[in-house]
Amino acid sequence: VGILITGIILLVIDLSQVGGTKAAKDASFSNAMWIGICQGLSVFPGLSRCGLTMGAALFCGFSRKFAVKYSFLVSVPAIIGAFFVEVPQFAAESMSVGTGAVYILGMAASAVTGYFLIRFLLRITQTLPFKYFAFYCFLAGIVGIALNFG
């Protein structure tokens, strides 16, 4: 259901042609607050953090390019916070050298993959209409609901 809501939000953003010319120098505390609230709402399953924060930035009048970059930038504190939440597991009694090495390899693979994926998504989201992402969300949401209740 959350991914369907994300699809609706993306479709509304695309059809309403929101956005503007505001850039980083035009950002205000209230803009950051609304974008932050949308990031907080993304803790609910299926709600896209990226979609909600980009939508909030566009509704605040920011340019599409800035909205996309800002959306990825605001994820950094959440990633750092998750890192510090998980670090104590390295001191657990069940942690072995092999398990630690697997964790570090997984983290490195995620970092490299994430870097290239973010670069790719930055290019795509700045050029393609959000309706394509909305249709993907609708398809994924319907398939998810069908698999869950079917």
Image: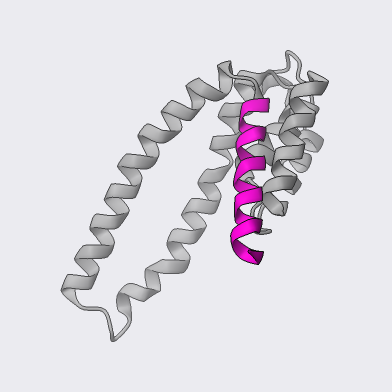
Split into 4 quadrants, where in the image is the C terminus? bottom right
Among all residues in the image, which is located at the extreme bottom? 93
The residue lying at 28 percent from left, 63 percent from top is: 103
- Let me know if residue 137 is in the magenta part: yes
Q: Quadrant of the N terminus?
A: bottom right
Residue at 55% across / 44% down in the picture? Answer: 75
Residue 12 occupies quadrant: top right
Q: Nearer the viewer, residue 38 or 15?
A: 15
**Farthest left residue?**
98
Is 84 situated left or right of 95 in this image?
A: right
Query: Measured along the vertical axis of the image, is residue 94 above or below residue 87?
Result: below
**Coloration mode:** one colour
Q: What is the residue that sits farthest to the top in this orientation?
A: 21
- Main SS, magenta residues: helix
State the image coordinates of residue 86 (x, y, percent, origin top left).
42, 68
Residue 97 lies left or right of residue 66; in this view the side is: left
Query: Which x, y percent locates residue 7?
Result: 70, 39
Tag count in the figure? 0
**Residue at 28% across / 48% down in the picture?**
109
Q: Is residue 43 left or right of residue 84?
A: right
Q: Position of residue 112 (x, y in %)?
A: 31, 41
Who's the residue at 54% across and 49% down the image? 77
The residue closer to the viewer here, 133 or 34, is 133
Residue 56, relative to residue 97: is it above or below?
above
- Compared to residue 106, the image places residue 98 above or below, namely below
21 relative position to 89: left or right: right
Q: Position of residue 98 (x, y in %)?
A: 17, 71
**Magenta residues, start to end:** 131-150
Query: Can you name the residue that lies furthest to the front here?
Result: 150
Which image quadrant for residue 118? top left
**Viewer-proximal residue, 57 or 12?**
12
